[in-house]
Image (cartoon, grey):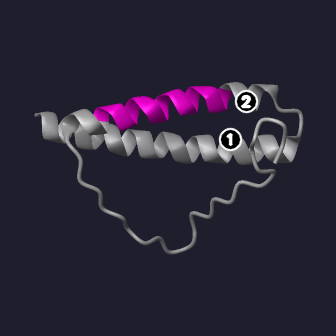
């Protein structure tokens, strides 16, 4: 881990088969999770900008993209339930 608590490698392999996890929550809970994920994504972008190690920065960019995809899916589900 670096001095900010991040692992040097952040494994994300989108080509491997993924098991699906289903989690039920209220709309308020989903909105809270969305807010938390968006705050983390914002923090992650700041970390990316301040990271000197190219490989680590690239891994964090990959994680940020993955996180954005999750946030988008969550937003879609929230809209579906709200309408």
Residue 17: x %, y % from top left: 50, 75
Residue 28: x %, y % from top left: 23, 33
> Which numbered mark, 1 or 2, is in the foreground of this view?
2
Q: In the picture, residue 23 is in which quadrant?
A: bottom left
Q: Magenta stretch: residue 56 in it?
A: no
Q: Label 1 to label 2, Cα distance in Å?
A: 10 Å
> Which circle's residue, 1 or 2, is located before the other in the chain?
2
Name the side, left or right, on which 58 lies relative to 54: left
Which numbered dot is residue 45?
Answer: none
Residue drawn at (52%, 43%) of the image: 67
Q: Residues within 10 Å of mark 1 (few under 14, many from 20)?
A: some
Q: Above or below — where is 34 with respect to 59?
A: above
Q: What residue is disc 2 on?
A: 47
Residue drawn at (51%, 27%) of the image: 39
Seen from the viewer's position, the closer of residues 49 and 22 is 22
Residue 74: x %, y % from top left: 34, 42
What secondary structure is marked by label 1? helix
Residue drawn at (83%, 32%) of the image: 51
Residue drawn at (42%, 39%) of the image: 71
The magenta stretch is: 31-45
What secondary structure is marked by label 2? helix
Seen from the viewer's position, the closer of residues 34 and 61 is 34
Q: Residues within 10 Å of mark 2 (few under 14, many from 20)?
A: some
Q: What residue is disc 1 on?
A: 61
Residue that protrudes farthest toward the left in the picture: 83
Q: Main secondary structure of the magenta part?
A: helix
Q: Above or below — where is 61 with respect to 50?
A: below
């Amino acid at each position: 881990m670096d001095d900010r608590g991040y692992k040097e490698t952040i494994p994300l392999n989108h080509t491997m088969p993924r098991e699906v996890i289903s989690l039920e929550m209220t709309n308020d809970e989903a909105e809270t999770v969305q807010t938390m994920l968006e705050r983390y994504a914002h923090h992650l972008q700041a970390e990316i900008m301040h990271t000197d190690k190219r490989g680590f920065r690239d891994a964090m960019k990959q994680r940020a993209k993955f996180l954005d995809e999750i946030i988008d899916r969550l937003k879609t589900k929230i809209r579906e339930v709200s309408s």
